[in-house]
Structure formats: C-alpha cells, structure tokens
Image: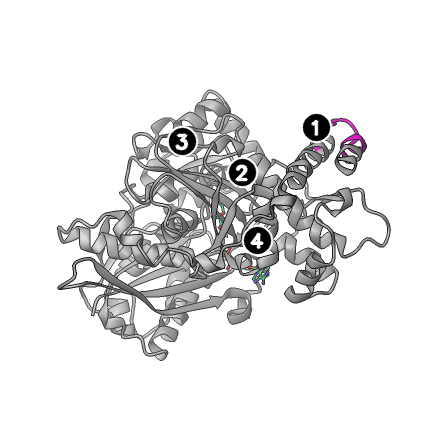
C-alpha cells in the first residue's frame, strides 16, 4: 500500500491527511483516496502553553509570537493519534508539510546535529527546548517591524526595487524584517543563533533529524530571496543582518526529497527507515495545490485565520501598488503564485460573533435577517492591525450605523471583508468567474453567498476541509514518484481529488451583483476617508442608497 502523509502546521492547529495513491495496473492512471484526516487545535489540546487562537499573550498588540515547542508537542501528539486511529505509519512512503508562512524559529549552533540524535524514549519538546536560541517564534500576525522595513527598503533602493527582486515590498510580518529586529534588539542572541528556520523548514528539520531546505513558495515570504534566481539575494541578506547567509538553510525546489525520516520517529512511531521527507512549503502554496490550481485560470480564497486570495501565475508580475505578493508555486521553480493577505479574517468574524454572544448558527441567522448591502452600513474590520490595506493601529471603523444596530454588524463584517478583497485584488488581473473557497469559514454557506455576489462568480467550496494538508500530501506523492524517475504531471496528481462537487457550487444572485459592485464603491469611499482623509462618505452612501 502506498500512503502519503500531508501535515499542516497552521496558526491555530496541526492537521494531517493520509492519502492513498496507487497506479491502476490495467486501466492506467492512478487511484487516490483520503484514508484519514485529523486536526489538533492548539488552544484546546495544549492549554499549558496559554495560547489564544494559537498565539501567546503580549502587552504590545503589534508583537505576536507563538511557541515552537507547542508545534513539536502537537506533532508528537498527532502521530500518536494517527497510530491510535489505526493508521499503519510503517506504510507511509513520504511526508511533506505546510507551515503558516513568514514565522521564524531560532536554533543554537549544534542544534541540527542534536536533532539527528534525539532519544526515542523521551518526548520531543523537552529535547528540542535546549536547542532553541530564542524561546518563542514571531509569526505572520506580528506587525512590530515598521522601522526595519523602512531600513531594508532604503538599503535596497526603495520598495519597488525590493518588490521587483523578491516579489513583495518590505512587509512587517516577513521574515527578513523580523530577523533584522531580532539582530538589533538582541545582538548577542542573534550572534549565538546558528540556524534560522521558517515554521515549514523547522518542522521538516525535526522529522529529518537534520537541516531541511526552504522551498521557493515559503522562501519568497522573507524579503530575502531573489525570485528569478530562486536563491538568496546577497544584497537583501546584507541589508537585513550581518552573517545572515551562514544562518540560513539552502533553498531547494519544493519537490526535493530531503532524505529519510530520523531514527527517533522510526523507533517511537514505527515509521519505516525509507520514509522520505519532502521539502515543506507555506500554507498558501500548499493550498494552491490542495484546491487544484496548478495551471493559470481561476482563483482561490482561503478563509482561515487570515483571509487570503491567490492564484497560479504563469509569468512573474509584481503589484505596483505594493499590497500583493508573488511567491514561488510548488509546481516548479519557474512557476509563481499571486497572493493578497488580510489579517482580519476569521478572528474578526469571531470578534463580532462573540460580541453579540452568537454561535455560528446565530451568525448565519443574522446574515439571513439583514438586507444585502446593509442599507449602506459599512464596517472597516480592522480589529487588529491590518496588512491589506496597511493599517498599523488597530481600530474598526463603522459608518452609517445607528444606536442599536446590532445584527447589522454581522452582515457588515462579512460584506466589508468581501468588498475589501475584491478591491485590493484587482492588480492580479485574473479571471474571477470561478472561485475555489477553502479554510475553516468556507463551511459557512451564507458567507460564501456574499462572496459569490461580491465577485459575481461561482464559488466552489473545497470538498476537503484541509486543503493545505491535502496539498502537502499530494506534494509528498508527486515528489516521491518523481524521485523514482516516474513522470506524473501536476494536472494528473490533482485530478479528481481536488475537483469540487458541482452540487456544492454557490452561484451569484444575478439581481444582487450590481448592488455589490456599488457597495464596493461605498466601501472604497469609506476606506479613503478613514485612511487618506478623503471626503466624508455620506455622498457615496446617498449615491448607493438612491441607485
Ligand atoms: P488556520 O488554518 O489559519 O489555523 P482554519 O482554516 O482552520 O485556520 O480556520 C479556522 C477558523 O475557521 C476559526 O477561527 C473559525 O473562526 C472559522 N470557522 C469555523 N467554522 C466556521 C463557520 N461555520 N462559520 C464561520 N467561520 C468558521
Ligand atoms: C500569507 C500570510 C498568512 C499565513 C498564515 O502571506 O501571512 O496567510 O500564511 O496562514
């Protein structure tokens, strides 16, 4: 039996998908089947770390860290769960993974060697703890590096030059600015750090018992990688921190088989000694595969902790507005993906839900009981500092609300998020007739209806809840068969299993699409007013209501 394991170390949980994929001997082609899915929520399963929605408390709202030890403890618990659920881990041929992007893990000199010599009768976390030079990991929600972003951009000849080279202007959450802040504030600990890994390459290193490479999908989220060369940019490294090259792993293609699983995992969980460890990637690049976007065409929207909108990009083209990103696509070194990220995604929806003391059913009912377009009410959902557009100081802004308008807030948060996504993704210039929806909130049909109406597009919820984990499992399969000299095309790899059910399609309501187009203009007027001192949006509201 040929089994492949896809893991997803995300903001709030660690998930796994076990995929069975085998050649059809007579008919040609392959069978593929998901044998098992499991997810461990960090807050619920590991309360001893004190996380809330997967992150550690901090007095400064711009500083957001999590715990690498929590992630490895979750890895151990997840493998035990798979075993207890009857999955024969000895049959797993290859493991690949997906990590929340941009977050970084700091290891002492000698840590990589120690990872290869872990004692299999002891748990993982207590053995990894002494290897960390920095106890916590800054993650993608951190927005505390504004100064470092400016310094790096200036040294690189400006934001556009940096974007042309790395695919993005300097972003606060990107790993380069985070490393620079660490170097500036804790120079001695920076000096004592032998290796800096991304969440993805850290988790892969633990499984490998050695140094895992970074792939171009996740490497592009650092402001350090030359996107065309698919290698570290000397200029960007120098602009970031001294001796940085020596502290980073290599960049290798996403399909690289890095080696075999370490003896720790063989002895403790019964993996076979020839289980391959495949390069991990970021959660968004893995989701690209997991929703089947391996060729130019449609887009996907992930409604996870962050909301992201992304698509396969055949030719490199960066956003001249400085809001979007280009990352490597796991399909190959000269393939790309475009992406735009909104920090106020699920947690903003949860904030409104909790404020009104609702559950998701109640949230749904509030959406049903309020009119499309919300009679011109608008909420700019910046409950936390926002990435797109750049809003450094948290503070939601509302417009057109009367005292006592409570349930309208539910509609306003969703309509605002969708309007913002539509407005800020125009640079991608991709067809939007069909949207693949994924992430936790894609289970909510009422949210998907507003998405369909805003974009005027058919929305297909992914039929696998965990598209990042599925993408990782499919990458494991692709890498393993490729390493054995077989050529299986990406369309063949993602066929059937990523095809959404046509019966789940949420169609736009033709009569509401023009209303939502006008709502976007109202939203834009509010954004301009609150961010750039544009005119009072009253005029835009009157125009919206009278049309
Ligand atoms: P991540 O991968 O970033 O950790 P997920 O994709 O697992 O996140 O999504 C988790 C989020 O899904 C939760 O924070 C929750 O708000 C949201 N969610 C789950 N079910 C629903 C629902 N029925 N309606 C809206 N949102 C939901
Ligand atoms: C993407 C981003 C987030 C994280 C967490 O740029 O910051 O989507 O990958 O999911």
Magenta-highlighted residues: 531-540
The residue pinned by badge 1 equals: 532
The residue pinned by badge 4 equals: 448
295 shown above or below 72: above
| Mark number, residue 172 | 2
Image coords of residue 93 (percent x, y): 22, 63
Mark 1 CB within 8 Å of ligand 2: no
Separation of marks 2 and 4 at Cα, in angstroms: 30 Å
Badge 3 or badge 2: first in the primary sequence:
3
Asked if one can make out residue 279 in the rendered structure from this viewpoint, the answer is yes
Query: Where's the N terminus, which quadrant?
Result: bottom left
Mark 4 CB within 8 Å of ligand 1: no
Image coords of residue 152 (percent x, y): 48, 28
Q: Nearer the viewer, mark 3 or mark 1?
A: 1
Badge 4 or badge 3: first in the primary sequence:
3
Asked if one can make out residue 9 in the rendered structure from this viewpoint, the answer is no
Which residue is farthest top? 157
Separation of marks 3 and 1 at Cα, in angstroms: 28 Å
In terms of image quadrants, where is residue 224? top left
Badge 4 or badge 1: first in the primary sequence:
4
Separation of marks 2 and 1 at Cα, in angstroms: 20 Å
**Quick check: marks 4 and 1 in contact, CB under 8 Å?**
no
The residue pinned by badge 3 equals: 166
Q: Nearer the viewer, mark 4 or mark 1?
A: 4
Badge 3 or badge 1: first in the primary sequence:
3
Image coords of residue 438 (percent x, y): 48, 54
Answer few, some or many: residues within 10 Å of disc 3's Cα (few below 14, many 20 plus, some between 14 and 19). many
């Amino acid at each position: 039996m040929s089994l492949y394991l896809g893991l997803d170390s995300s903001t709030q949980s660690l998930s796994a998908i076990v995929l069975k994929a085998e050649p059809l001997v007579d008919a040609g082609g392959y069978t593929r089947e998901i044998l098992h899915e499991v997810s461990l929520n960090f807050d619920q399963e590991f309360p001893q770390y004190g996380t809330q929605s997967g992150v550690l408390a901090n007095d400064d709202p711009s500083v957001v860290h999590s715990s690498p030890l929590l992630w490895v403890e979750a890895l151990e618990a997840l493998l035990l769960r798979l075993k207890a659920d009857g999955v024969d881990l000895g049959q797993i041929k290859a493991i690949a993974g997906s990590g929340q992007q941009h977050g970084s893990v700091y290891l002492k000199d000698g840590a990589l060697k120690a990872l290869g010599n872990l004692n299999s009768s002891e748990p993982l976390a207590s053995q990894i703890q002494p290897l960390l030079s920095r106890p916590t990991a800054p993650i993608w929600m951190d927005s505390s590096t504004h100064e470092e972003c400016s310094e790096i951009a200036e040294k690189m000849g400006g934001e556009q030059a940096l974007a042309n080279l790395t695919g993005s202007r300097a972003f606060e959450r990107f790993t380069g600015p985070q490393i620079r802040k660490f170097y500036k504030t804790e120079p001695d600990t920076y000096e004592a750090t032998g290796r800096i890994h991304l969440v993805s390459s850290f988790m892969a290193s633990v499984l490998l018992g050695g140094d895992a490479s970074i792939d171009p999908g996740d490497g592009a989220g650092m402001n350090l990688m030359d996107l065309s060369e698919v290698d570290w940019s000397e200029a960007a490294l120098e602009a970031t921190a001294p001796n940085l090259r020596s502290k980073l792993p290599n960049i290798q293609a996403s399909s690289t088989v890095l080696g075999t699983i370490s003896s720790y995992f063989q002895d403790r969980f019964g993996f076979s000694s020839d289980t391959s460890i495949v390069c991990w990637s970021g959660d968004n690049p893995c989701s690209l595969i997991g929703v089947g976007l391996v060729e130019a065409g449609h887009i996907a929207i992930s409604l996870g902790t962050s909301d992201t909108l992304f698509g396969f990009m055949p030719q490199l083209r960066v956003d001249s507005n400085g809001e979007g990103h280009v990352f490597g696509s796991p399909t190959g070194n000269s393939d790309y993906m475009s992406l735009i990220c909104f920090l106020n995604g699920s947690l903003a929806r949860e904030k409104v839900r909790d404020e009104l003391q609702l559950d998701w059913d109640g949230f749904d009912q509030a959406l049903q009981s309020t009119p499309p377009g919300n009679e011109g009410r608008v909420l700019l959902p910046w409950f936390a500092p926002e990435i797109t557009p750049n809003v450094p100081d948290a503070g939601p802004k509302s417009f057109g609300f009367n005292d006592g308008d409570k349930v309208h807030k539910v509609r306003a948060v969703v309509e605002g998020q969708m309007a913002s996504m539509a407005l800020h993704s125009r640079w991608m210039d991709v067809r939007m007739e069909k949207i693949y929806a994924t992430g936790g909130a894609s289970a909510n049909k009422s949210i998907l209806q507003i998405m369909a109406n805003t974009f005027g597009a058919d929305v297909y919820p992914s039929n696998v809840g965990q598209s990042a984990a599925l993408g990782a499992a499919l990458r494991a399969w692709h890498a393993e068969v490729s390493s054995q000299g077989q050529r299986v095309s990406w369309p063949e790899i993602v066929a059937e299993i990523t095809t959404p059910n046509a019966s789940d399609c949420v169609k736009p309501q033709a009569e509401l699409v023009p209303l939502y187009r006008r709502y976007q203009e109202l939203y834009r007027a509010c954004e301009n007013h609150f961010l750039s001192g544009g005119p009072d949006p009253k005029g835009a509201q009157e125009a919206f209501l009278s049309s």
